[in-house]
Image: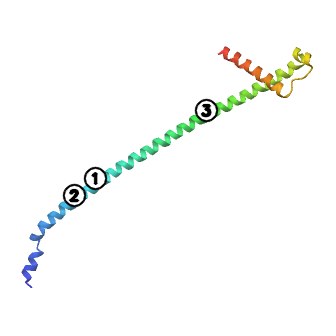
Amino acid sequence: MDDTATYMDYSPEFETDDSSQNSEKDYEGDDKKLRRREKNRIAAQKSRQKQTQRADSLHQEYELLERENASLKKEVQSLRDQLKQWNQVVQQHEPQCSMLRTTGAPLIGKQQIEMADYLSEDWREAELLTY
């Protein structure tokens, strides 16, 4: 084997062509990696932003539903109070009712419920007229 030929094969002169091609490939590879990382960073940022917006939206919806629930609870309590008042009105009216004197039967069971329904319907109509 010739030592000079072996030396020339590995000399910098012969490697410049290969190394310049390798450095271009490395540069292209690095460039692709950087572009891919940048795209991934942007995609992750968008994903986090979307997740934050979704969480904000859910929180707003939760607060709205909490307010609605509180309002409905107040309405239920108000309706229960009205029902108590109407039951008292019916009980106070029973002894003086001319319809009951003719039949002699007190308002009980289904009749009492029907009377309460009738009175509550009148109450709703009167309430609507005041608004």
- The one nearer the camera, 104 or 24, is 104
Q: Amino acid at mark 1?
A: Arg
Total numbered circles? 3
Q: Earlier in the sequence, mark 3 or mark 1?
A: 1
Q: CA distance from mark 2 to mark 3?
A: 59 Å
| Residue 112 appears left or right of 64 | right
Residue 7: image quadrant is: bottom left
Residue 103 position, x and y percent, is 91, 18
Above-or-below relation of 97 to 6: above
The quarter of the rendered structure image containing the N terminus is: bottom left
Residue 122 position, x and y percent, is 74, 17
Q: Which mark is residue 85?
A: none
Residue 27: image quadrant is: bottom left
Q: Which mark is residue 68?
A: 3
Q: Earlier in the sequence, mark 2 or mark 3?
A: 2
* Most distant residue in the bottom direction: 1
Q: Are marks 3 and 1 in contact (CB under 8 Å)?
A: no
- The one nearer the camera, 28 or 128, is 128
Q: Secondary structure at mark 1?
A: helix
* Residue neighbourhood size for the residue with mark 2, other residues' Cα within 10 Å, grouped as few (<14), some (14–19), many (≥20): few
Q: CA distance from mark 3 to mark 1?
A: 49 Å
The residue that label 1 is drawn on is: 35
Q: Residue at x 39, y 50 (%)?
A: 44
* Residue neighbourhood size for the residue with mark 1, other residues' Cα within 10 Å, grouped as few (<14), some (14–19), many (≥20): few
| Residue 93 appears left or right of 8 | right
Q: Amino acid at mark 2?
A: Glu
Residue 81 position, x and y percent, is 76, 27
The residue that label 2 is drawn on is: 28
| Residue 33 appears left or right of 129 | left
Above-or-below relation of 3 to 75: below
Q: Are marks 1 and 2 in contact (CB under 8 Å)?
A: no
